[in-house]
Amino acid sequence: MIQYMDGILNFNKATGMTSHDVVASIRRLLKQKRVGHASTLDPAASGVLPICVGQGTRVAEYLSDSGKTYRAEIVFGVETDTYDSEGVVVRTGSVAGITLAQIEQALERFTGQQMQLPPRYSAIKLQGKPAYKLARIGEDISLAPRPITIYRLEVIDWLPPRLTLSIECSKGTYIRSLAHDAGEHLGCGAHLAALVRTRSGPFSLAESITLEQLADAVAAGNDQQVAGFLYPLDIALQSYPALRLDDASVERVLHGNAFRYDEHTRANLARVYDTDGHFLAIAAWDEQRSLWQPKKVLL
């Protein structure tokens, strides 16, 4: 097995696994200590979960900030306390009079920038503890609404009482809350029955790998295949401009010193490369000094 590995895995998480379970499994398989996930997926959800390995953990925050797409199945007429199928049913309602046109009209209300109230059963920390742990012991908890953006809601299928949706949204969006809120709006209640993340930032489900595929490559001692599963670090920063530096500026970057770059860009962050195209650092624009300041040196 390769002793040191740096990069990002486009991982397809199976249902039933927590994001922490995935990280622990990959640590054992790759014999790497520095492994982390970019964003999370509920155990009941499946799909794309970017896993950062080695130096990849240093760019995880930029992957977490990226947009996501999902395929969701929402069941109307049944509301649960967790807003998903694993919770306790707290209300039922009739869906007999609900039409596809009514649903599409309701979905328009949830498109765009908005404030969303997260589920009580979520991993958001309150007093240092996850909200779901406090909710399970019956504590009265109050979560604050959070700003999110839902860019697209597209109906794939409506077979009452089950609605299948394609969703494109910003980070921090709770699809469980969307399902619950849609049920409230239509007056019949609803919960999220199934969820698949089909894209996270630059990573798509079609190009993802499973734990079994990674385990098979490791068991076969196929270092080349394992390395081939890893994406380079700079894939997390493709939305930022690339700065290619001469040797003198590269030396400044490697020592953490600010540098000038002749070509003008209005971006606040940039990818920094040497003349051979090696990814060196992430730099932030210093407006006061009109200089680029290395934020993270990755060599």
Image (cartoon, rainbow, N blue to C red):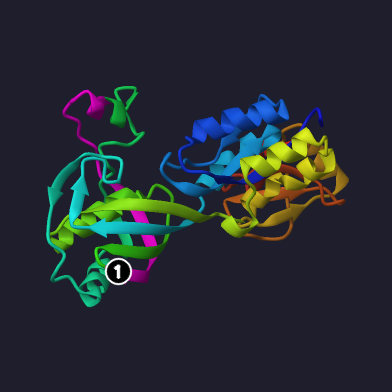
The residue that disc 1 covers is: 159
Residue at screen point 21% across, 40% down = 81
Instruction: Read off the magenta span.
Output: 134-159
Which quarter of the picture shows residue 16? top left
In this picture, residue 194 sits left or right of residue 211: left
Q: Residue at x 66, y 46 (%)?
A: 291
User: From the image, which quarter does the C terminus lie in?
Assistant: top right
Residue 210 position within the rendered picture, expressed as x and y whole percent measured from the top left: 62, 45
Q: Quadrant of residue 129?
A: top left
Q: Is residue 208 above or below residue 37?
A: below
Q: Is residue 299 visible?
A: no
Picture layout, residue 185 above or below residue 99: above
Taking depth in this image into account, of 297 and 189 the one nearest to the observer is 189
Q: Residue placed at 30% from the left, 46% from the top?
A: 84
Amino acid type for the residue under numbered disc 1? Leu
Q: Position of residue 235 (x, y in %)?
A: 67, 51
Side (left or right) of 16 relative to 79: right
Q: In the drawing, does residue 37 fall left or right of residue 253?
A: left
